Amino acid sequence: MKEKRCEWAENDKLYMDYHDTEWGVPLHDDRKLFEFLILEGAQAGLSWITILRKRDNFRKAFDQFDPHKIILYDEKKINTLMNDAGIIRNRLKIHAAIKNASAFLDIVNMFGSFDAYIWQFTDGVPITNSWTHISEIPPETDVSVAMSKDLKKRGFTFVGPTICYAFMQAIGMVNDHVVTCFRYRELQT
């Protein structure tokens, strides 16, 4: 019998794999958290499948999302990135990644880890919703609004409430799999 999954992930193998193995799984690794934050910002105005198809290229172009390396990017590196067809070539988003790397490292210095900082918005535990249809899932919540405000106050860009909510979904701070999806039940345990 075919397992039922969220409808957004039913028609593309890359989406299926991402849905089945990553989306909604609680994540606590700082480097991966930084990667998702940058990728969610890069996705603004685009579809997530576009980012997934370019994710390996992003990893290579952005030094495996090492914030210590990214903060050192100069105009020469920015121009190299602007000429890299394997990523989203948007100067504002590239500058945001550099600025966000610096803000990220400031948070790590202040809180000990980005993980400790970001998970405080849900008291360290995932929020489990009970949506029956994808149309019920909101684009933002009070928590994502609060996260967005705090990140902006700390110097981040491309972290609006909708981007923050997508980030929360991606890193498992919220379980937004619909209740009929097999991953909804799996992520309960």
Image (cartoon, rainbow, N blue to C red):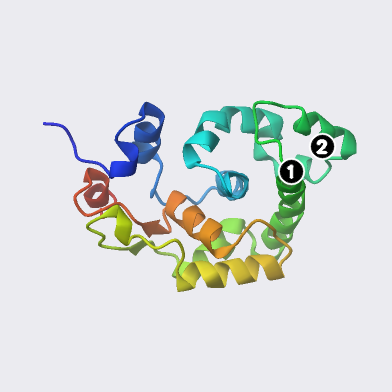
Mark 2 and mark 1: Cα distance apart in space: 7 Å
Contact? badges 2 and 1 (CB < 8 Å): yes
Q: Is residue 23 above or below residue 86?
A: below
Instruction: From the top left corner, tell me how far across and down residue 158 is, in percent.
Output: 65, 56
Question: For the point 26% across and 51% down, which residue is it?
Answer: 184
The N terminus sits in image quarter: top left
Q: Which image quarter: residue 102?
A: bottom right
Q: In this image, 139 relative to 109: left or right?
A: left
- Vertical order, 109 against 20 (above or below): below
Numbered circle sitting on residue 183 = none
What amino acid type is highlighted by mark number 2? Ile
> Which residue is label 1 attached to?
94
**Residue in front for this viewpoint, 95 or 44:** 44
Task: Of the two numbered discs 2 and 1 on the same chain, state the one appearing first in sequence.
Answer: 2
Coordinates of residue 115 in the picture (x, y in percent)? 55, 57
Secondary element at tag 2: helix
Residue drawn at x 48%, y 59% as measured from the top left: 165
Residue 153 lies, with reference to residue 177, above or below; the image says: below
Q: What element carries label 1?
A: helix
Circle 1: is it few (<14), some (14-19), or many (20+) Cα within 10 Å? Answer: many
Residue picked out by circle 2:
78
Q: Looking at the picture, which amino acid does disc 1 mark?
A: Ile
Q: Which residue is drawn at 19% across and 50% down?
A: 180
Does residue 183 sit above or below 78 in this rendering?
below
Along the line of sight, which residue is nearer the eye, 7 or 174? 7
**Percent position (x, y) of residue 183?**
27, 45
Q: In x, y percent, where is residue 176? A: 34, 56
Whether residue 37 sits left or right of residue 172 in the image: it is right
Label 2: how many residues lie within 10 Å, few (<14), some (14-19) or many (20+)?
some
The image quarter containing residue 17 is: top left
Q: How many numbered callouts?
A: 2
12 or 120: nearer the viewer: 12
